[in-house]
Image (cartoon, helix red, strand yellow):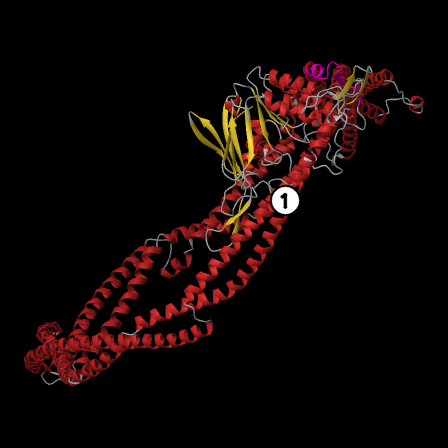
């Protein structure tokens, strides 16, 4: 990982945007970050850490103290960092949460935490994440280190510099795992453990299956009593071979039992076959005897029904003879009925004709056809006059309706003229009122302007009253903040004076007898100055500076708040026009009343204008309606004249056709009834004559057919007739009787011949049936016993094979499971692993040995050969990670001791050597995290001059391979040795600035 560029805005002690170009130091390889205590040197590293992780190493409260105290509410706070990981260049921008002025209205609003991550692709920055959480997750994958690990190997910050040296084995394991990517070894151990468990489960399952099969076979042997009683009463063998031999013995006994039962089943088959044949022979003889008896009974019954069948045969023959005469007889009966009906209809028609012509000249007419023809001609003439009679009634109705329509139109014209006569006067009245309302409505706009002006002034006056209290409170706060800022400044000045006064004592504390003084060069120090009782340390000055800066910032903020309050109050009072709230409320009430009156006048004006427009439109519509009514009245009068002419012509034609009748329709109806009666009488007489002729012909035909038949007369033939179903039933009954009689005689003869020589008494089959049932039951029991024995033999044979296969699998799997278990336990740090060190820890221990070897190359020089780091694989207590311990070997004593026993300077040297060794080994590992940029924050002040030179030479060696190292220190000797410097200076106004010069000293 290499850093390129850092920008800090409103962050820590920096107000304006400050830039750091790390690439400018790539040629030197090592540079110094210098500046006074409290100027903000460590804030540069805070910015790097905040950009990458959203937190800083010095503050436990996160980013809540990151915003510069010098920032005004509207000033931004932002950190931007460009860096490279592998071959990909990134730029991350972060801003913490802080308060800023609201864009709308007054007061402050919270600016939320902001983060953005970009990647440089083909010369353009491409966004990859834009939310704090997304940026954090993305950077976790890119960096490969969490914040704590980053501060242990790259950013060696104050109070965290020696953490890797003094860390526990578990903490050291977490860091090394991230640096070297050894989590896969933990996965290997876990996978081996899972494979060991799976192998053991499989082995247990195979053993359990073998035992289950053996138990099943033993239960099967015991259930079928294959073990002798004396053996069953003893204990079951415990060893596998004996149990397996017992299964084989049971299988042999089951096979012997199967052979015995097979022979018994064959004997039972033979016995049943013989019994079945004997029983079948006796059953057949008994069946023949019973059938002969039934045949004799059936023949006797058929012969008894012979007379009845003969009578049925005679009835059948007569019915078939009468069936030939059925149609002529039916025809004759229908003809006679038709002739009688026709005669009755003719008489009725003659009576109707007589009634129709009674009292007329046609009553004595002999030729009815001539009378009908004459009436038909007259009806044609009178029917034509019916149309004139119907048109006459319709014409009268239409003429009356037309007259009523004309009268209504005349009335509408008169009423419309009366209404239009009132319109001019109404229009004149509306015009007068409209003029007055227009004058009153013209005052609405001035009244609205006045009302709005007073409303705004009243709101401003009310606001000014409320802001007056806020102004007084802000001025009081400003006064108190100014006093506190002055007091804080005085405290800083007093501490600085005490620091200057105590410099002699601090310098005297560093003097060594026989060594030259840094001021005068003398090697003798007869009267060194005494140190102050309460020396002023950098921490006290830093705290005082921070308190002063905070007080100044609060005073500035309070001043801005007071200024804003005064400006807001003055602006509100100016908008109010200098008048009080009550006076403005009275004026606003009067303006509201004037505006309401003007609004009412506008409403009345608009209503009158609309009424006048509507009235004029109605008058125009009335004029158009009158013209239309006049035109329709003329058309109605013309229509009435035409209807009167048509009605007169129709009345003349009707009078001529009506004659002596009430109407033409009445005359036509009377003539039609006479003509229809005559026509009906003529038709009825003709039908009666035809029916009588047909009846006579049918009677003659029937008489001739009776004479030629077996019947004496019509009555006898009619009595012999039978329905078709009855005839068919007689024929079927006769045929069935003849068939059954012949079959019964033939079967009886056949049975008598079959039983010739057999005893006449009935054969008994019960004894043979009982013998067959007993033989069948014995055979069924033998079959069941044989099937059970065969199933038992097959089951025992299958179980024996499965038992042998299962135990063979157990033997084969046991060795493999044991090997896997030993390997899994060894890799997981369990027995037989005597070191209790898992695989990942073993790998990390090897890496730690290389780190220690690389660190000792530098620590030996820096400690003049006295100290060496020593890796220890001693077992840790209480389940902690073993194999990652570090100790210090002291050459003066020849004993190793804990790293915690070193002094402050010694701890710094050992930590620096270990950090540099760690960086070197990690960088050399392919696939690991490459550490191209390192920072060391303070600690050099605890070293003597010679040790400091050794440490500087060690740092100088790190430039090999293109690595860049940044050192934060205020030690003067380091300023002289490092020409590439980054200076952090506090300005007189308070905020710090960064001055970068890679070639000149500061």
Left/right of residue 995 with respect to residue 800 in the rendered view: left
**In front: 498, or 488?**
498
Instruction: Examine the rendering and report whether any part of residue 758 can be seen.
Output: no
State whether residue 982 is above or below residue 456.
above
The boundaries of the magenta stretch are 858-875
Question: Residue 81 versus residue 464: which sits nearer the camera?
Answer: 464
Quarter placement of the N terminus:
top right
Q: From this viewpoint, is residue 128 visible?
A: yes
Instruction: Answer left or right for 352 relative to 229.
Output: left
Q: Is residue 966 left or right of residue 621?
A: right
Q: Is residue 248 magenta?
A: no
Count the marks. Answer: 1
> What is the quadrant of residue 201 in the picture?
top right
Residue 983 vertical position relative to residue 366 in the rendered view, above or below: above
- Element at label 1: helix
Instruction: Judge whether 68 appears above or below 117 on screen.
Output: below
The residue drawn where x is 62% and y is 41% is: 545
Q: Which residue corresponds to the image point at 24% horizontal and 74% vertical from the top-left?
A: 610
Q: Residues within 10 Å of mark 1 (few under 14, many from 20)?
A: some
Residue 871 in magenta?
A: yes
Image quarter in which the C terminus is found: top right
Q: Which residue is mark 1?
A: 547
Question: In the image, residue 25 lies at what x, y percent?
Answer: 53, 22
At x 21%, y 83%, the residue is 429
- Which residue is nearer to you in this view: 992 or 483? 483
Q: Quadrant of residue 505?
A: top right
Q: Is residue 986 left or right of residue 694?
A: right
């Amino acid at each position: 990982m290499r850093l390129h560029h850092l920008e800090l805005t409103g962050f820590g002690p920096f107000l304006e945007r400050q830039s750091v170009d790390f690439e400018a130091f790539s040629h030197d390889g090592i540079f110094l970050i210098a500046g006074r205590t409290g100027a903000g040197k460590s804030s540069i590293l805070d910015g790097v850490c905040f950009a990458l992780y959203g937190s800083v190493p010095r503050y436990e409260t996160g980013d809540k103290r990151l915003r510069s105290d010098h920032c005004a509410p509207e000033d931004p706070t932002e950190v931007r960092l460009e860096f490279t990981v592998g071959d990909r260049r990134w730029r991350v921008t972060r801003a913490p949460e802080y308060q800023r002025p609201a864009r709308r209205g007054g007061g402050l609003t919270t600016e939320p935490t902001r983060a953005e991550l970009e990647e440089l692709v083909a010369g353009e920055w491409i966004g990859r994440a834009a939310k704090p959480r997304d940026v954090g997750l993305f950077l976790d994958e890119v960096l490969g280190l969490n914040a704590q690990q980053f501060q242990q190997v790259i950013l060696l910050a104050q109070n965290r510099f020696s953490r890797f040296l003094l860390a526990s084995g578990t903490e050291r394991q977490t860091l090394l795992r991230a640096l070297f990517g050894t989590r896969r070894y933990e996965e290997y151990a876990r996978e081996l453990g899972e494979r060991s468990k799976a192998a053991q489960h499989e082995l247990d399952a195979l053993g359990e299956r073998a035992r289950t099969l053996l138990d099943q076979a033993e239960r099967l042997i015991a259930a079928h009593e294959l073990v002798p009683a004396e053996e069953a009463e003893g204990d079951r063998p415990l060893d596998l071979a004996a149990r397996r031999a017992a299964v084989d013995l049971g299988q042999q006994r089951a096979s012997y039992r199967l052979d015995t039962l097979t022979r018994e089943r064959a004997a039972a088959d033979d016995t049943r076959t013989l019994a079945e044949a004997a029983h079948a022979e006796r059953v057949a003889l008994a069946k023949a005897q019973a059938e002969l008896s039934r045949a004799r009974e059936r023949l006797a019954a058929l012969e008894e029904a012979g007379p009845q069948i003969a009578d049925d045969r005679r009835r059948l023959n007569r019915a078939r003879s009468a069936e030939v005469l059925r149609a002529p007889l039916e025809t004759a009966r229908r003809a006679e009925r038709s002739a009688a009906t026709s005669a009755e209809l003719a008489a009725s028609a003659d009576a109707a004709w007589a009634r129709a012509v009674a009292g007329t000249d046609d009553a004595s007419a002999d030729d009815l056809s001539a009378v009908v023809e004459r009436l038909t001609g007259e009806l044609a003439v009178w029917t034509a006059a019916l149309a004139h009679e119907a048109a006459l009634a319709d014409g009268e109705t239409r003429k009356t309706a037309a007259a009523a329509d004309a009268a209504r139109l005349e009335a509408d014209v008169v009423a419309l003229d009366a209404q239009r006569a009132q319109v001019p006067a109404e229009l004149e009245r509306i015009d007068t009122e409209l003029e007055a309302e227009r004058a009153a409505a013209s005052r609405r706009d001035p009244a609205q302007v006045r009302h709005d002006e007073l409303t705004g002034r009243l709101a401003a006056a009310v606001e000014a009253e409320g802001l007056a209290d806020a102004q007084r409170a802000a001025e009081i706060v400003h006064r108190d903040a100014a006093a506190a800022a002055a007091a804080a400044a005085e405290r800083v000045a007093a501490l600085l004076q005490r620091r200057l006064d105590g410099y002699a004592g601090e310098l005297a504390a560093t003097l060594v007898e026989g060594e030259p003084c840094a001021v005068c060069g003398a090697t003798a120090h007869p009267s060194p100055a005494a140190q102050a009782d309460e020396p002023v340390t950098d921490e006290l000055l830093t705290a005082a500076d921070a308190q002063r800066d905070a007080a100044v910032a609060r005073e500035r903020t309070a001043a801005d708040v007071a200024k804003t309050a005064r400006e807001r109050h003055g602006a509100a009072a100016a908008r109010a026009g200098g008048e009080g709230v009550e006076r403005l409320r009275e004026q606003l009430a009067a303006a509201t009343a004037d505006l309401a009156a003007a609004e009412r006048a506008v409403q009345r004006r608009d209503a009158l204008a609309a009424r006048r427009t509507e009235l004029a439109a109605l008058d125009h519509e009335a004029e158009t309606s009158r013209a239309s009514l006049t035109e329709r009245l003329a058309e109605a009068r013309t229509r009435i004249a035409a209807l009167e002419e048509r009605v007169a012509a129709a009345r003349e034609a009707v009078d001529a056709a009506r004659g002596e009748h009430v109407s033409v329709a009445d005359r036509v109806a009377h003539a039609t009834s006479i003509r229809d009666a005559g026509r009906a009488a003529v038709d009825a007489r003709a039908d009666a004559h035809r029916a009588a002729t047909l009846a006579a012909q049918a009677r003659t035909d029937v008489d001739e057919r009776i004479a030629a038949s077996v019947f004496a007369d019509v009555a006898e033939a009619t009595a012999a007739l039978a329905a078709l179903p009855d005839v068919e039933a007689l024929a079927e009954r006769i045929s069935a009787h003849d068939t059954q009689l012949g079959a019964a005689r033939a079967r009886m003869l056949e049975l008598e011949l079959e039983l010739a020589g057999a005893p006449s008494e009935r054969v008994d089959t019960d004894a043979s049936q009982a013998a067959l049932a007993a033989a069948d039951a014995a055979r069924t029991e033998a079959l069941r016993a044989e099937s059970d024995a065969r199933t038992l033999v097959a089951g025992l044979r299958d179980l024996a094979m499965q038992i042998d296969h299962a135990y063979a699998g157990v033997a084969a799997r046991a060795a493999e499971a044991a090997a896997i278990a030993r390997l899994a336990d060894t890799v997981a740090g369990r027995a037989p692993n005597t070191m209790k060190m898992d695989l990942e820890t073993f790998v990390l221990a090897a890496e730690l040995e290389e780190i220690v070897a690389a660190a000792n190359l530098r620590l030996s020089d820096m400690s003049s050969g006295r100290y060496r780091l020593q890796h220890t694989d001693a077992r840790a207590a209480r389940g902690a990670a073993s194999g990652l311990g570090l100790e210090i070997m002291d050459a003066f004593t020849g004993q190793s001791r804990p790293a915690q026993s070193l002094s402050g300077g010694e701890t710094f040297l050992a930590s620096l050597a270990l950090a540099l060794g760690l960086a070197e080994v990690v960088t050399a590992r392919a696939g690991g995290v490459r550490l191209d940029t390192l920072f060391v924050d303070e600690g050099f002040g605890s070293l003597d001059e010679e040790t400091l030179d050794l440490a500087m030479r060690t740092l100088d060696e790190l430039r090999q391979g293109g690595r860049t190292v940044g050192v934060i220190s205020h030690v003067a000797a380091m300023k002289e040795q490092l020409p590439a410097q980054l200076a952090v200076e506090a300005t007189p106004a308070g905020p710090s600035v960064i001055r970068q010069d890679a070639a000149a000293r500061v």
